[in-house]
Image: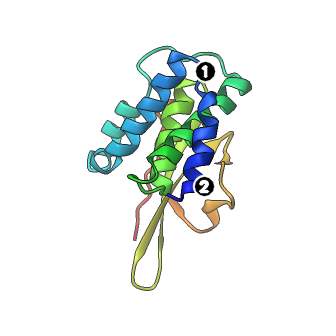
């Protein structure tokens, strides 16, 4: 991480307004650090661990934007230690946004290149990719989906 990025993250520390915000940032740090171990588990178990164990608040756009800002802040501070991959972004955003009441899904996809297979994960909101620069569905075949609604998709990868 460059010093300018770290200074920028430090300037944004005032986004942590309450003890609940601080706890969320700490949780995001822990979740991000555990992703390599988490992804060794069966995906149904990952879903169980990522889903909130309590009733979700009503969706609120202000809270959702604030949650995304806190996740970005946590990941910026974690960057010297953790790689900012799609898996890190997707899982931490999913974890935090579900707790903020947002109805999002975490999709996993694969694509076959000439001599390798690439993977990607992304959030889905209202049926469309969410927070993606370009639609990953054009490049990746979705093979699994984690959703609070207990819907999953498994596709056969040939």
- Give the image quarter of residue 69: top right
Picture residue at 66% right of the left edge, 48% below the top: 131
Q: Give the x, y percent position of residue 22.
A: 49, 24
The reply, left or right, for residue 83 in relation to residue 134 is: left
Q: Give the x, y percent position of residue 36.
A: 31, 51
> Looking at this view, is 112 or 6 the one in front?
6
Picture residue at 50% right of the left edge, 55% below the top: 86
The reply, left or right, for residue 16 in relation to residue 42 is: right
Q: Vertically, is 68 above or below 110?
A: above
Q: Residue furthest bottom?
A: 114
Q: Residue furthest right?
A: 61
Mark 1, Cα crowd under 10 Å, few <14 / some 14-19 / many 20+, is few
Identify the residue position indicated by label 2 in the image: 4
Element marked by disc 2: helix
Q: Give the x, y percent position of residue 71.
A: 55, 38
> Looking at this view, is 39 or 8 the one in front?
8
Picture residue at 57% right of the left edge, 40% below the top: 10
Residues at marks 2 and 1, CA–CA distance in whole angstroms: 23 Å
> Looking at this view, is 21 or 35 the one in front?
21
Mark 2, Cα crowd under 10 Å, few <14 / some 14-19 / many 20+, is few
Marking on residue 17: 1
């Amino acid at each position: 991480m460059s010093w300018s990025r770290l200074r920028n993250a430090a300037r944004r520390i005032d986004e942590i307004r309450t003890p609940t915000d601080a706890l969320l940032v700490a949780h995001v740090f822990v979740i991000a650090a555990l992703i390599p171990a988490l992804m060794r588990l069966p995906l149904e178990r990952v879903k169980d661990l990522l889903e909130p164990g309590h009733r979700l608040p009503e969706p609120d756009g202000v809270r959702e934007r604030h949650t995304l800002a806190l996740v970005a802040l946590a990941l910026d501070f974690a960057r010297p230690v953790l790689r900012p991959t799609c898996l890190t972004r997707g899982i931490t955003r999913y974890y935090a946004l579900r707790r903020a009441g947002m109805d999002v899904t975490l999709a996993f996809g694969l694509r076959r290149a000439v001599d390798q297979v690439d993977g990607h994960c992304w959030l889905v909101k209202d049926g469309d990719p969410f927070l993606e620069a370009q639609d990953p569905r054009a490049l990746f075949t979705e093979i699994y989906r984690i959703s609070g609604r207990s819907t999953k998709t498994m596709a056969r990868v040939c």
